[in-house]
Amino acid sequence: MAALNTQANIKAPDEFYAELLAVHEGRTKAESDALNARLILLLANHIGDRQVLAEALHAAALEE
């Protein structure tokens, strides 16, 4: 069983962040929220491991 990796693991993180901002550019808050929801579901499906997803939910909730 995999564990949630919270260490830096994205190649070229600044470029990814710029892409993420760019995809939201010109969208309303509702459109951006819907895009984020679709992105979360796509990535959750890619991960697939329910334990890892549960750990991610817990870790994200702690950041509030």
Image (cartoon, rainbow, N blue to C red):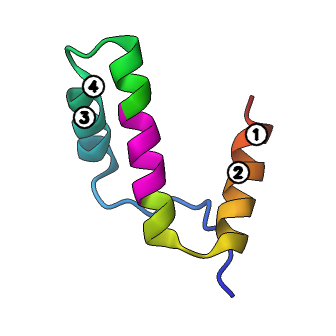
Answer with the quarter of the image where residue 10 lies: bottom left
| Residue type, label 1 | Ala
Query: Badge 4: few (under 14), some or many (20 or more) residues near its Cα, within 10 Å?
Result: some
The residue mark sitting in front, 4 or 3, is 4
Where is residue 36 shown, x and y percent of the image? 42, 36
- Counting the numbered discs, the total is 4
Q: CA distance from mark 2 to mark 1?
A: 6 Å
Quadrant in which the C terminus is drawn: top right
Image location of residue 38, percent across then percent down:
40, 44
Assess whether residue 12 is covered by the magenta stretch. Answer: no
The numbered disc on residue 61 is 1
Q: Mark 1 to mark 4: distance in Å?
A: 23 Å
Location of residue 17 in the rendering, given as x and y in whole percent from the top left corner: 32, 38
Q: Is the residue 42 above or below the residue 15 in the image?
A: below
Instruction: Determine crowd level at label 3: few under 14, some 14-19, many 20+ residues with C-alpha closer than 10 A.
Output: few
Q: Amino acid at mark 2?
A: Leu
| Circle 4 residue | 24
SS state under label 4: helix
Query: On the image, which quarter does residue 46 sit in?
Result: bottom left
Q: Is residue 4 left or right of residue 39?
A: right
Q: Secondary structure at mark 1?
A: helix
Could you tell me which residue is drawn at 50 percent across and 71 percent down? 47
**Measured Cα–Cα span from mark 4 to mark 3:** 10 Å
